[in-house]
Amino acid sequence: MHSHTGVSSVDLLALVLRILLLTSTAVVAGVGLLRAVVAVPPWLAWTAGGIAALASGWSAAVLDINIGFAVAHAILALAVPLALRWRAAATYLGFALALLLIAEAGLGHSSLAFFLDTVFAAVAVVWFGFAVGSWPDDSGLRPGPVALTAALALAGAGLAQLLVSGLLDRRLVDSAYGRVLVGLAVASLGVLVLTAVLRDVRRVYRLGAVGVLVAVVAWTALPGIPQPHDLAVPGIPRLASAAGTPVLVSPHRPGRNLVHFPASAGLDVLVESGGRISRAVPRPGSTGIWAEVELASGRSDFVVRRGAEQGTVDVDTGELPALPDAVAADGPECASAALGGIAAGAPSVLDSCPSAVLSTEDEDALRKQIGYLAAAGVSSVAVISDESPRSRAAVDAVLSQAQQRGLAIRDDPGGALLVVSGWSRAEEALESSNSGPGYIYGVHLAPWLLHGPVVNAVAGSSIPLRFDPRDERSLTYGMTLAGVFGGEPPSLAGFRNWLAARQENLTGDVAIYASAQVDVMRMANHPHGSSAAGQWIPQGTIVAISGPLPS
């Protein structure tokens, strides 16, 4: 099975074994099932049964499959040719093998996929049974209507497989999965045309067996071939997979773009675009590694090299204007916001970054944070900011509220430190504060700085939030994001987009939460203070230290 991010290669051994196993099983099952009316040379039955048994045993030895299924499969495959002299026994054994074939092919599939698997398996069993056997003209059989029914069922299943794939676009010819789908549909329709045109039913079965074989091989191969990525859409950050790792391209517009890899990708990653090679490196305030690339307008691609692995990512930037904020200092937060929508299954055009504006909710939280500090008897606050529009607006809100509360704004170790910059500047400032005299009333962060690498830059800090990072909804987002992008930690910007895609938002009262790094007392039944996927503060804990703050 392949996730929606895809994989970079095919497990060739597993694919060959699956094709050998299912096609040979269809032949031997058909031989047994139709033994009462069709005569088959014993050598052919033994050959098909032997291949099926061998493929089943080999699969059990080298692949992670159910041993019970493998043993039953091998026994039934060899029992059919053994029982050919007893028509009833062979028929029952062939029927049992056909049922096992359907169960193995459709295991874990949805109802529609299981129905299509049943059709392909049933048609293959019946068609191969007639194709390899013979029957007298005066036997009373009517194989013609059976052939027409099977051909109609096969054509319908082939077309349905194509339609439900969702690949009715250029991916049908641009990807191996799409080409196999097309081959499946064409072969299925070809069998129907052949059945309708030819009058000699024996020729119908024997010539049609070629088309059925092609359709069955394509059907058995599909689960072992990586499904192609979603089509690249200009302006929607591109999530793909290359060189065995997830890749995010943001903002996916002409000009400069960030290419992001999760921490699990390691540090030995190169990106080649337009003849230029860029090394992906860490950026302050974020996880994983980042490379800057220049993308041309329209469709193009770039190469990702990760150690000995290599892959290509196709992009389509269209003719959209550039978005400089998405590759500037606050670019990682912008990319994280986009990942929130992608994790929710609703990617959207990235036309602005969180640092471009101070939201009403965050301004309100900052004002209440200043009120909280004033009520706690803090005499002064040192403010760290940057040049982004959000940070400048945050400074204005803080100054206004501090003036109302009689709170001095100055750098004084006897007061508190408040950080309202973006991630990059925040981590650098917090790292610097660790070597200074410290602030008696601690470190306080703006809401959007709730991101593991920023928060963990100091031993402890407090943040005004409208939600509990430990509740079910918050952890569900975190785990979903980690699954989509290699353990990526949550962010407030991404959480908001994830909620918006689910027609939800953050409407709770503001409370102060305290975060601290935790290295001891991590118990299996205590998720806080762990590094498990989905946690907002890796290797840390975060708890509410106030009730709802007054306006």
Image (cartoon, rainbow, N blue to C red):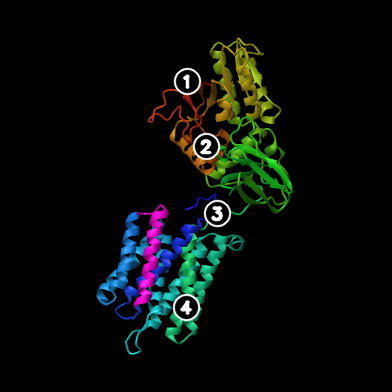
Sequence order check: which comes first, mark 2 or mark 3? 3
Where disc 4 sits, the SS reads helix
Residue contact between numbered discs 4 and 3, judged by CB atoms under 8 Å: no
The residue to which callout 3 is attached is 9
Sequence order check: which comes first, mark 1 or mark 2? 2
Whether residue 160 can be seen here? no
Q: Is residue 359 above or below residue 1?
A: above
The residue to which callout 4 is attached is 208
- Give the foreground label among 3 and 1: 3
Q: Per the image, is 59 magenta?
A: yes
Q: Position of residue 506 (x, y in %)?
A: 52, 34
Magenta segment: 42-66
Distance from the alpha carbon under mark 3 to that under mark 1: 50 Å
Distance from the alpha carbon under mark 2 to that under mark 3: 39 Å
The residue to which callout 1 is attached is 545
Q: Position of residue 370 (x, y in %)?
A: 58, 18
Sequence order check: which comes first, mark 4 or mark 3? 3
Q: Is residue 38 above or below residue 279?
A: below
Q: Farthest residue toward the bottom?
A: 138
**Closer to us: 262 or 305:** 305
Crowd tier of the residue under label 4, counting other residues whose Cα lies within 10 Å: few below 14, some 14–19, many 20 or above: many
| Badge number at residue 505 | 2
**Closer to us: 272 or 347:** 272
The residue lying at 69 percent from left, 53 percent from top is 300
- Magenta stretch mostly in which secondary structure? helix
Crowd tier of the residue under label 1, counting other residues whose Cα lies within 10 Å: few below 14, some 14–19, many 20 or above: few
Q: Position of residue 48 (x, y in %)?
A: 39, 71
Where disc 1 sits, the SS reads loop
Q: Quadrant of residue 335?
A: top right
Where disc 3 sits, the SS reads loop
